[in-house]
Image (cartoon, rainbow, N blue to C red):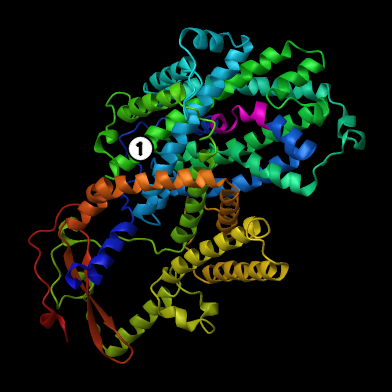
Amino acid sequence: MARWLPRSTDLTRFCQKLSRVKTLEDDMMETSFNRCLSTIDLTLLGIGGMVGSGLYVLTGTVAKEIAGPAVIVSFIIAGFASLLAALCYAEFGARVPKTGSAYMFTYVSVGEIWAFLIGWNVLLEYMIGGAAVARAWSGYLDSIFNHKIKNFTETHVGAWQVPFLARYPDFLAAAILLVATAFISFGAKVSSWLNHVFSAISMGVILFILIMGFVLAQPKNWSTQEGGFAPYGLSGIMAGTATCFYAFVGFDVIAASSEEARNPQTAVPRAIAFSLGLATGAYILVSVVLTLMVPWHSLDPDSALADAFYRRGYAWAGFLVAAGSICAMNTVLLSNLFSLPRIVYAMAEDGLFFQIFSQVHPRTQVPVVGIVVFGLLMALLALIFDLEALVQFLSIGTLLAYTFVAASIIVLRFQQQKVDVPTPAASGQPNPEPHEGPSSGELKEYESFSDKLQLVDRDKSKEQREPGQLKAMFEPYLEFLSDFYPGEVVTVAVVTLMVSAICLCSILVFGNTHLHLPTWSYSLLLILFSLGFLLSLLLIWAHEQQRSTQTFQIPLVPLSPALSIVLNIYLMLKLSYMTWLRFAVWLLLGLLVYFGYGIWHSKENLRELQPQRVSARYVVFPSGSLEERVQPVQPSSQPTTGLPDTDTNDCKR
């Protein structure tokens, strides 16, 4: 019986496979894609992903049913919360200018299995999101023509009464997705140009709404006679914030496009900042004019803006609003179809997904197989499935990706930068002999033992300033932490911080409703988990960070990513249990794909199977002893063959 149990070494090796991180190339600007996108192109892609139908529908819904005119405050808070996540994406997009977005960022810092699961969830998120927007686009256009398209389809094709299927096949939604797929497959420049056209029309309509809205504004609509500015109080504002937060989902298309940016180090952070600022401003200003034009309690949630102009005697403005809404939904469709194949490409390129999706068309320089396959799947979803029950699934995938990207920022910032050890084969230098002088590399001779001792002391003091090591000011109080490997304590503290955040948010969400905790235990648990969160945060801050680089860095690390983690977890726990159940089923399917294919075909797995060379290092301790440490060193580019073995006896003094 015991022989069937796995050995501890096998379990250790298996866990190492799951947590291995991606090895980045020396030249991260090298790519098979076409680097043709400017800062303006990326900014408009981000605006197109964020300013969709939500501007025309969500503002009225939240204003009437959740927050009243205080929807403005809800959008301000939601914009700030989205900024925390966006800044994390901006730093990663500038430092790792590779396609893949949250998947890639997690892979280079946290580990392989977590990266795969993030990519797997983002994949479904984009598919459902694109199909849902296509059906909304179809329904909006159909409503302009008094639902003639729907009536014709039900009469000549028929209506279905099948669970999980739509009432009737939506051929218009499938057709618009197929057309968008064709344009996306022509290349990044064509996609960007098409997005420019729709974004320009959409922004022109928004400008018209703002000008006309302020002309028709009536301040009395915020007066106490109409219910006041915040009729639902603080709880309504915060509930509105949770809903408004999803309006800003879409800026990650900029990070997914970083491998096609001309200068990603500056273009990606600027584009994310500009697009998020413009989107937030648009949502806030449209909310202002909407609630000032007509009383908030009389808004039509389905078509608030068009109805507001109609009630003020400008029915013709409804057609402009409808045109702007359709163009805005087109930009969201393009954003989804643009990002999804590139994330699939990144997973396939790393060997975690089927290799056929890593093919790039030589002329258009886009992953055309992924675009066509997932465009067809998206069209099939929009054609026959009922997506209303699945739309809430979008939130959990996005929030999970935001959480892992924020945690990855902390882990990466406190990691030692990986420096490749030059090998003789790569550098063209002959192998150093044991008795060579200082010019020979690692093995050096010194005139006296005191010279060796001074060198070791100097190196030791330098190491204490390396990323991931304890700051000098805290050494007298936390000296026991100095023995850990650099970054090890920070990694444990990040895990503790996330566990504390989950427990804290669980008490906040379920403590009074589902768990029915008494007041004393509710307060005690809040205090305990808050202390755990703060102590983990302080422990991370007590370690050295990586020094400032030439690329953008998010300020106030680890505080900013930690706040983003808490907010994302809180919003995830507010989702329904059915969303979590569907999420668990999708995760199980993803694990089957990973353990059946990804873990065996991973490029990092193939890299581990390559032969390793051995190098010897010598450490002089203050006691006077000389110790040799043998370390495996990965070959830089080609397999190391013909390297002489290191003879320990020849090297020791």
Judge left or right: residue 222 versus residue 339: right
Q: Which residues are magenta?
A: 47-58
**Which residue lies under the disc numbered 1?**
344
Is residue 97 in view from this perspective?
Answer: no
Q: Is residue 558 above or below residue 30?
A: below
Q: Quadrant of residue 649?
A: bottom left
Q: Is residue 173 above or below residue 371?
A: above
Quarter of the image with the C terminus in it: bottom left
Furthest-bottom residue in this view: 623
Query: Which residue is at 23% across, 53% downward?
Result: 605
Helix, strand or loop at label 1? It is helix
Q: Is residue 475 magenta?
A: no
Q: Is residue 232 above or below residue 179?
A: below
Q: Position of residue 382 (x, y in %)?
A: 46, 24
Is the residue marked by circle 1 packed among few (<14), some (14-19), or many (20+) residues within 10 Å?
Answer: many
Query: Which residue is at 55% across, 13% downward?
Result: 150
Query: Which residue is at 64% across, 17% downward?
Result: 322
Amino acid type at circle 1 is Val
Quarter of the image with the N terminus in it: bottom left
Q: Position of residue 61 (x, y in %)?
A: 70, 32
The front one of 256 and 159 is: 159
